[in-house]
Image (cartoon, helix red, strand yellow):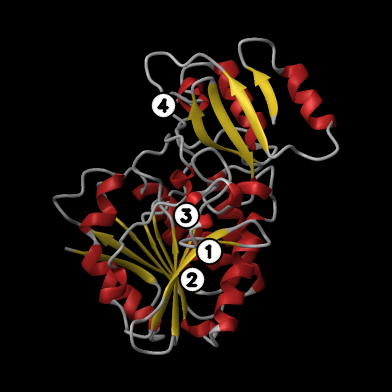
Amino acid sequence: MFQLDTERSFASSISHLDRLESPPMVVECVHEKGAHDWTSLIHIAQASGPHKRLLIELVNRGYHLFRAHERGSLFVHRHHIDRVWDKIESGEYIYTEDHLVYQLSFPEQRRPGRLLVVFSPVASNRFTQFLDRHFSISFKSIGRYLHDDTLILRIADLGGVVGSFYLPTTYDPQNNEKVQRLIRSIASKYRIPEKRIVLYGASKGGTGALYTALQTGFRCVAIDPIVSRRSPKKDPYYAYTAIFPEDREKLFLRLAAEKASAGWGESHITVVTSPGSAEHLPIHRLAAKSPLARCTQLLIVHHPGIERHADVGPRTVPTTVATLNNALVGLNHSPGVYHLR
């Protein structure tokens, strides 16, 4: 175990870490705990610039906080995450050679004939010391409302502090390529054709679903994806840090232009948003005003209960279920902007 004392200058320790022949499995960060036993480097980093820089340095070397102990915080390297995550050890989650974590839910009676890929949203406690912050199991009952031959693949969002949004990161530029390989390997194993693969996610998960759809051409239902830059003064997802090599909004606009110049296939993307969400305007710019509009059905839901971004997913469940089932059977839709009242 490599020890790093955050109460002293940590630059030399980081340099020492980089000089090691191979990354140690665990890095121990010693720091003040304050009044709470569960205080971790993630919490301290919210108010301390030096601690935030240290956290980013560790993340960019492939480390994930997995426990806050009595002396500070423990970080595990991505390549050894299976040795400290109890749900991998128990078999509830599966760990791959690409260092991804996933879970499969099978149809109860029928052989799998369709594949729904669920990308995780931000965890309810995004700053928890536990690795479950990377794998929020949302809409647990979704299988009840889908075609009864649907295999459900849920993929953890490893990378970053609270997740990578399934995007390329400084530590892992091939992050999304690995996600794509996993999806294709599961589909191949269960003989599911690509036209029966549907990507789904809400919020952060919607970002991952949309990005992966643009890369692969798979059908996609993205619920209020986070595609905006957000304010650097309020950056709870570390989007403005060195963790991400490219600005998120520029990334999507560039990708939309690249795919358009290469020629679009059939319309295969549905995006759901609402005027009550802070993401509404940037989503509209991307899905209705950029070249992405050529293959996108943008559904704008007007609901009195949607007052913020977090309300969109829970308040649009009927729309989500309908669009998912349409996508799973391969129904085509016309691109455009549609207002649902």
Dot 4: element: loop
Q: Which residue is mark 3?
A: 87
Q: Are marks 3 and 2 in contact (CB under 8 Å)?
A: no
Placement of 45 over or under 22, stated as above or below = above
Dot 1: element: helix
Residue 2 in which image quadrant: top right
Q: Residue at x 51, y 50 (%)?
A: 165
Where is residue 95? Give x, y as percent.
59, 60
**Which quarter of the figure is the N terminus placed in?**
top right
Q: Are marks 2 and 4 in contact (CB under 8 Å)?
A: no
Distance from disc 2 to disc 4, alpha carbons, whole Å, reads: 48 Å
Of marks 1 and 3, which one's residue comes earlier in the chain? 3
Dot 2: element: helix
The amino acid beneath tag 2 is Arg
Q: Are marks 1 and 4 in contact (CB under 8 Å)?
A: no
Residue 247 in which image quadrant: top right
The amino acid beneath tag 4 is Trp
The amino acid beneath tag 3 is Lys
The amino acid beneath tag 1 is Pro
Where is residue 91? Give x, y as percent.
50, 62
Q: Which residue is mark 4?
A: 38
Distance from disc 3 to disc 2, alpha carbons, whole Å, reads: 42 Å
Q: Observer-nearest residue: 63 or 219?
A: 63
